[in-house]
Amino acid sequence: MTPEQDQSLATPGTQVRMRVVSPGAASRELQLTNTSGTATFDASAVGGEVLVTVESGANDFVGRARDALGNTASTPVCRITLADLIVTFTGAAADGTVGAADGAVVGSDLTFTLTGTVSTAGASVSISVDGGAALPAVVSGTSWSRVLTLAERAAPYDVVASASAGPLVGQASLALSVDLTGPDPVSDLTAVADTRPSRECRLK
């Protein structure tokens, strides 16, 4: 999420509205873990809604419930990442597929330039592919680019662009397929004769 999605403009910071639902529970609570540590909020009010201030980066939420006998239940972690910077992909890769026309092909590898934008000029941008090492991108103003070489394969690549500018952070993900397979071979080539009768036109 971004600060523009703040759920309470009158409250300092960026807020998200969470709901913990557990029919029949005697009590409900919401646990938040981020860089500031772990905090717990009461979610036992009607509807189970809690308004929570989130921090830049990852905010991990867990909903917990307890019945009258002391039995407990909890949800899997729900991660909400607050992105102060907006990162986008542009160019040929933005639609999720790149091919031979988008770069240079050597064997089954395609070398192409991945491009995008970041909302703040001067931010640092890095690219990771399938969870690999971060590769620095070249940033000019609010535009960034990185030359990548990827092999053709059936499964798409998980490409993540991460940006930072001081305490501000942002991230965007892209499922990117590399398609170097040409169309089926031409199976027929036929010359078709024009069988229409010819007419001679004369000017009078």
Image (cartoon, helix red, strand yellow):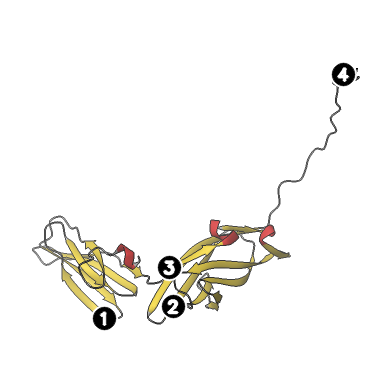
Q: Earlier in the sequence, mark 2 or mark 4?
A: 2
In the picture, the disc for residue 197 is 4
On screen, residue 140 above or below 95: below
| Residue beneath the point at 52% across and 64% down | 89
The x, y position of residue 199, in whole percent, is 89, 19
Q: Do the residues labelled 1 and 3 touch (CB within 8 Å)?
A: no
Q: Residue furthest front?
A: 204
CA–CA distance in space, label 3 to label 2: 10 Å
Q: Quadrant of residue 64?
A: bottom left
Residue 193 screen position, x and y as percent = 86, 27
In this figure, which residue is indicated by the disc labeled 1?
Answer: 37
Question: Element under label 3?
Answer: loop
How packed is label 2: few (under 14 Cα within 10 Å), some, or many (20 or more)? some
Q: First in sequence, mark 1 or 3: give its number.
A: 1
**Amino acid type, callout 4:** Pro
In what element is the residue under mark 1? strand
| Residue annotated with mark 2 | 164
Residue 161 located left or right of residue 21: right
Which amino acid type corresponds to the residue marked 1 in the rendered image? Gly
Type of residue at label 3? Ile
Q: Is residue 199 shown left or right of residue 45?
A: right
